[in-house]
Image (cartoon, grey):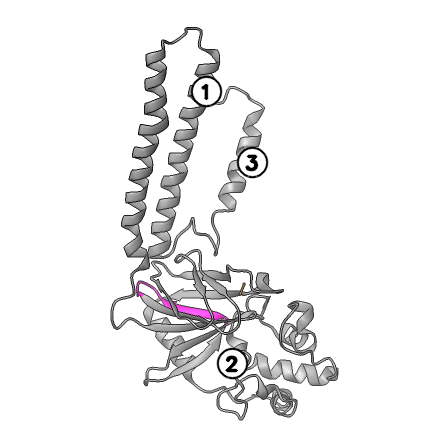
Amino acid sequence: MSFRARGSRPLLAAVASAAALGCDGPQSSLEPAGRDAAHIAELFWLMTIGAVVIWVVVVALALHALYAKRERDEKTVDRLVVIGGAVIPTVLLAALLVYGLAMLPGVLARAPEGSPEIHVVGEQYWWRVRYPDGEGGTFETANELHLPVDVPVELRLEASDVIHSFWIPSLAGKMDMIPGRVTRLRVEPTRTGNFRGACAEYCGTSHAWMAFAVVVEPREDFERWLAAQARPAARPSDDRALAGASLFLSQGCGACHAVRGTPADGTIGPDLTHVGGRRTIGAGRVATSASALRRWVAEPDALKPGVHMPAFAMLEDDELAALAAYLEGLR
Ligand code: CUA
């Protein structure tokens, strides 16, 4: 490709590289890592290329009309209007409709009978996730989804308060989570990796901070992770963490949070049984670390405006440190 105007080259290069940079990463529907995302990306590219071709033809015709020397006879003009204005758009739009509709059943299909089912509930502003424990029951975790590669998984989606929308752009389309209703989404990751999901429906002050980590891993790694997550919490390993564990109970944290294997069995907030092993806290807000946990407990609202968790700013520094040590040790 050559461009006449030399001055436009750096600009075009800048635009192209910015566009390319914006199209990859852990949250891109244009770099699909799932079966349905691949279909959606295919449709996107087909429509984009089609739109560009049509735009070029229309602009070329417009320029031709502006600069053409020769007058056309009326019959030719009429024919051009009918063909260009009615026949071609009808044929193209009908073809696109058939192509799009033919794709729909595949994208909306349920996962095959017997596929693993994961239950995700949208909350203001985090994700409650329930996995089967392998013994007919379920256990709960939050804000992180692990999926086996090349296995279709059925996601059962609900909302507890307002409408949220569940979206992992790299893996599949988005699906609304509606209070009082169950919606379903099949995901079938086609390669391993770390991805990012997000809420795609405005749901309140911290809608923009409602994200989650998605880890797609080989089946054996997934099974190992699942078995570890199903186990009750690890016992605190040192004095500081032990002090944190008793503070957790005495401060009433257990009224909202569960730590399986301890008396804490609240269900209002995220299950914290393995919170220290998650990649982020606050639903994708900050990377997990003792200092981040400490800050979260002291002033959650500063990290996440509108969060329902009250601040525990009245705790002394050493108490906050003990609580953070305990939580960080819950791997
Ligand atoms: Cu939940 Cu936006």
Q: Quadrant of the N terminus?
A: top left
Q: Position of residue 17 (x, y in %)?
A: 52, 39
* Magenta stretch holds residue 144: yes
- Residue 185 place in picture, x, y as percent: 37, 64
In percent of width and height, residue 253 lies at 61, 86
Q: Which residue is mark 1?
A: 62
Q: Nearer the viewer, residue 84 or 96?
A: 84
Is residue 1 visible in this depiction of the protein? no
Kindly report the distance in space between the C-alpha atoms of the residues bearing marks 2 and 3: 46 Å
Q: Is mark 1 within 8 Å of ligand 1?
A: no
Q: Which residues are magenta?
A: 143-152
The first of marks 2 and 3 along the sequence is: 3
Specify few, some or many for label 2: CA neighbours under 10 Å numbering under 14, 14-19, or 20 or more: many
Q: Secondary structure at mark 2?
A: loop
Ligand 1, image quadrant it occupies: bottom right
- At horizontal 39% and vertical 52% (from top left) the residue drawn is 32
Seen in the picture, residue 65 relative to 167 is either above or below; the reply is above
To which residue does mark 3 refer?
A: 14
**Amino acid found under the numbered disc labelled 3:** Ala
Depth check: give the residue in front, 132 or 52: 52
User: Quick one: 73 or 157, which is closer to the camera?
Assistant: 73
The local secondary structure at tag 3 comes to helix
Using residue 241 as the reference point, say whether residue 232 is left or right of it: left
Query: Looking at the image, how many numbered discs can be counted on the residues?
Result: 3
26, 210: nearer the viewer: 210
Q: Residues within 10 Å of mark 1 (few under 14, many from 20)?
A: few
At label 2, the amino acid type is Asp
